Amino acid sequence: MKKMTKYVIAIGFLLYGSVSCTDVLDEKAVDSFNDASVFTDFNLSKAYIDNCYKFIAGGADYILGLDRRQIGCSTDQLLSTNGAGVMLFTKGTLSPDNYGHFNDSFILQVKWSNLYSNIKNANVFIANSDKLLLSPNATQAKIDQLKGEAYFIRAYGYYLLMSAYGGVVLVDKPFALNQDYLSISRSSLKDTRDFILADLNNAISLLPSKTDAVYQQGRASKGAAAALKVRLLLFCASKLVNGGYEPTNALVSFTDGTQTERLTAARDAAKLIMDGTYGTYALYGKTTKPPAVMTNAIIQEYADNYASIFLQKGKWLDESIWGVDFSASSGWPNQWNLHQGPSSWHLWGNGDPVEDVVRTYEMADGTPFKWDAYNPGDNVLRKATAAQLAADPNRSPYNGREPRFYATVFYHGAQWVPRPSDQAGYYRSLENKIQSGNFYKNDETTLIAYGMDTRNAPTDNWNASKTSYTLRKYQDPTINGIYVNNSNSYIDMRYAEILLSYAEACIELGGADLQNGLDALNLVRNRAGLPDHVTADQAQARAWVQHERSIEMFAELPHWYDIRRWMTVSTVLTDVRAMLIKEMENGNMEWKMDMGTVVDKRIWNPINIWVPIPRIELNKAPNLQQNPGYI
């Protein structure tokens, strides 16, 4: 046991640089660390928990998918420019022997072995936390906080496992050397949920609120544990695990109780946060009804407000509940600009928004966007002369859209920061505009040049978008991502999600709860500059709340879990096609869906709704039962 513990502790000291050098480096040599030193020294124990945070989503450097191949590329929303072929969830070929992107070094929040590795680390801390001695550095409140953080970290790991695999192996103590794996088996979905709930309740009882003196931004708080509880309970109240798939299989479905009971639990857990039980959280920005007439200036104001939520540096907004607090000195490689920015800025542009989803963003007045608004029945081609555009700018599909569109998506003609000097002379001078289309002479037949952000550009074309869109969300306009890491925080849990989770639970409960759900939904819409939704129809309200979650949390962690638990993957996962854009010298424009080329062929395999248990784990522990449909 001592040998295993020393190994785990040694990993913890990869983060010693984030702790005071005086506190840590004046202690014993690293090779002398053991249970007696680490778990009786508060500073070393804190460094140990610091490292557990770094591995909270299963990986050292890629936090919750904030990297090149983020989990959004396994959904309908994004296409991985240079990695689509290994996105096996969208190819229908995910199997126990081939995980593709779920087994690489980027998307680790579903990787079985990595998640259990951090659960093991949390187990070691929880088992040894009572050895911590009171001292000037280690008050009981600080010791309780670290223990609460360990419960939160373990709960998060198990939540990620459960929401990908269903019922999993529940381990609450450190493994012993030479432990027999033959007796290991999976617990039911219900027992897995109950285990996570117990950890979260322990965390809530031990952690500080965000206003307590011992709270530190980026560490868990009562609010963070409560927000994770809402996520867990909403997943457990959803269609997937309530008769939607293998209803009699206790590993992937609840076989007792009722969905109404589980929806009520999710609703009530969200309401506790809304009532301020764990601290004051609020949407950032105006939540009053927006102006009836949305000018471009007003739209931009709402867009800037929404964008700022994802560009936070320093003290967090009240909307932020938990996330990763990056800073220039942290050493954490947050390179969101480099990995996701537009190619003609020499950035990698790896997450391309998909046309079918871009079209789901509403108009600024809250009405649905209609591609064929000017030519009914034609959902492929839009054309407009310069005169028509001057008379009606909304003939452009990118004009007059809701504010979140402009904060989330780089589209042809979108403005950003000044281009690199070596790009300034290419083609026509369009200053700082994204150029995803082609330029044509007045006769509209002779090609002059491709846009600087296309796959046919003379530089960086291998990183150019395949859909004609690039992800703007999280892009910090104040840094040069080629050389400088991002320092804007990654906000994993925020108050908008709590409101939308409450809204969903209320709408699914129906009856008197439906209006309460719409009220919460409309707070999020109003903050985004959109008018209220009004209906007494539950099916309509359900469609609205699912849409609102998809747009409000576009390219954020929950969406992959949402489309699975709603069981809408087969509907939303469609072949990806590019938008071809002609910008003529006389000001005329064409926007055309390229129906002749499939950029990414997507095939939905229903058994992939649950991730398969890796073959290597089945070989080690033959009592593990595979998920349904897999061999």
Image: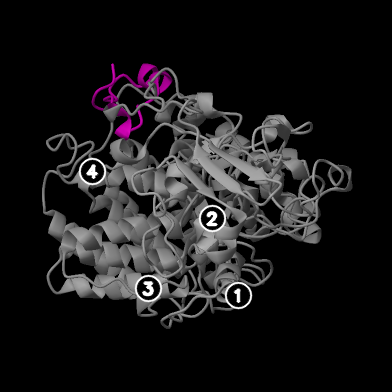
Q: Is residue 575 left or right of residue 264?
A: right
- For disc 1, the marked residue is 297
User: Given this view, does label 4 or label 3 mark the residue nearer the observer?
Assistant: 4
User: Which numbered tag is attached to residue 396?
Assistant: 2
Q: Residue at x 24, y 42 (%)?
A: 189
User: Given this view, does label 4 or label 2 mark the residue nearer the observer?
Assistant: 2
Query: Of helix, strand and loop, which mostly describes the magenta segment?
Result: loop
Q: CA distance from mark 3 to mark 2?
A: 42 Å
Q: Position of residue 631 (x, y in %)?
A: 28, 16
**Badge 1: how crowded within 10 Å, few (<14), some, or many (20+)?**
few
Q: Earlier in the sequence, mark 3 or mark 1?
A: 3
Q: CA distance from mark 3 to mark 1?
A: 34 Å
- For disc 4, the marked residue is 240
Q: Position of residue 319 (x, y in %)?
A: 50, 71
Q: Is residue 617 magenta?
A: yes
User: Given this view, does label 4 or label 1 mark the residue nearer the observer?
Assistant: 1
Q: Position of residue 190 (x, y in %)?
A: 22, 46
Q: What is the magenta range?
A: 607-631
The amino acid type of the residue labelled 3 equals Ile
Q: Earlier in the sequence, mark 3 or mark 2?
A: 3
